Image: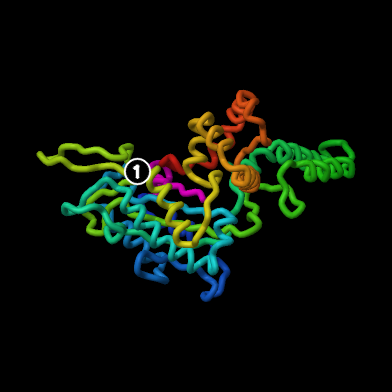
Amino acid sequence: MYVSITAQKLGGDYSQSSADFVGYLEKENEGLNPGEMEHFFNQYGEEISAEEVVKEIDGNGAKLKKREPKFYSITVSPSKYELQKLANNSQDLKRYTRELMKDYASSFNREINGRPVIVNDIKYFAKIEHQRSFKGTDIEVKENQPFASKILELKNEIRRIENGTLEGNVKLLKREIAKLEKEAPHQQDGKRIVQGMQKGGEQSHIHIIVSRKDMSNSYSLSPGSKYKSSEIEMNGKMVKRGFDRDAFFAKAEKTFDNTFAYKRNFAETYKARKDFVKNPNLYMAALFQLPPNEKAAAFKLMSATGVPVIPTIPTSQAQLALRIFKRLRRGAEVAIRSSSIGI
């Protein structure tokens, strides 16, 4: 499972309103019958319109400056193994979202009227989506890019030949294009993966738009705080502040496991992915200390989910393994983007 938190885009051509982002989340409903559409929901409501979401989020930013985010986006992407535990993707993910937002609230080191933050303080709207498209930042698209560039170059040559501005053999160039299409390292259903191509398989995930201000529009609740837990003096009073992202991500996994009786492998945990990037020595030590069956399952999961993985290496070759792991860490950073805040 991957959980990311990103701030509202501000500045430049970006609007101060949430309308563009809400419109983006409505894209999957285009062309669907009313009964097939996924609607926004929150802790207690169903079938909330996009217009209401925009009105509620935009109207809940009292005293926030122009350069301060008025909302954050939380994206929750269960793995295919996690999705297999669901009986009904839409209803089960809605149920999970409502539990997840309790974890979100409890991860704030804040008090409202002398008590900890609870889910009823959080103004949010969520939406389930069932499709994903490849982005330019995806490793598959990046590694296919040299082939895409060469194919585009050859297609331009063909156009010039057909326009009479260049001499050449069109049939030969088309054969070269066909060869490059097959040689591209990342394929889906026999076709080269390109930006915008819809991803195959089960892709259900959750988008949550959450207001920076609490339900009363009085308290700022920022998951982008650089503090996990601290206190600051304001108007002569000590005020708690902070948001523990690591705790939130860990709770998100535990809540999923408890809700759906999911047995999580070491390789699927947020902590393991973070250690892989931040402390490969610790990651390797934990990996090789797993019981044989769990270790085998970990390697299988890492390979299947696209997390870089090395072959099974004897512990006597730990230094060699470490060098390989360090070379692979750059790719693994994609899997740990959830540890940061930003667009």
The amino acid sitting under disc 1 is Asp
- Magenta portion: prevailing SS class: loop
Q: In the image, is residue 65 above or below residue 284?
A: below
Tell me what residue is drawn at x 30 percent, y 57 percent.
122
Nearer to me, 55 or 187: 187
Tell me what residue is drawn at x 74 percent, y 55 percent.
189
Q: Looking at the image, which residue sits at the far left?
A: 236
The percent position of residue 242, horizontal first and vertical second, equals 29, 42
The percent position of residue 258, horizontal first and vertical second, equals 45, 59
Q: In the image, is residue 159 above or below residue 52?
A: above
Screen quadrant of the C terminus: top left
Quadrant assignment, res 152: top right
* Label 1: few (<14), some (14–19) or many (≥20) C-alpha neighbours in 10 Å: some
Q: Looking at the image, which residue sits at the far top?
A: 319
Residue stretch in magenta: 1-15
Q: Secondary structure at mark 1?
A: loop
Is 59 displayed left or right of 209 in the figure?
Answer: left
Nearer to me, 152 or 272: 272
| Residue 295 lies within the magenta run | no
- Residue 268 visible from this viewpoint: yes
The percent position of residue 145, horizontal first and vertical second, equals 68, 39
The percent position of residue 50, horizontal first and vertical second, equals 41, 65
Q: Which residue is mark 1?
A: 244
Q: In the image, is residue 14 above or below residue 214?
A: above
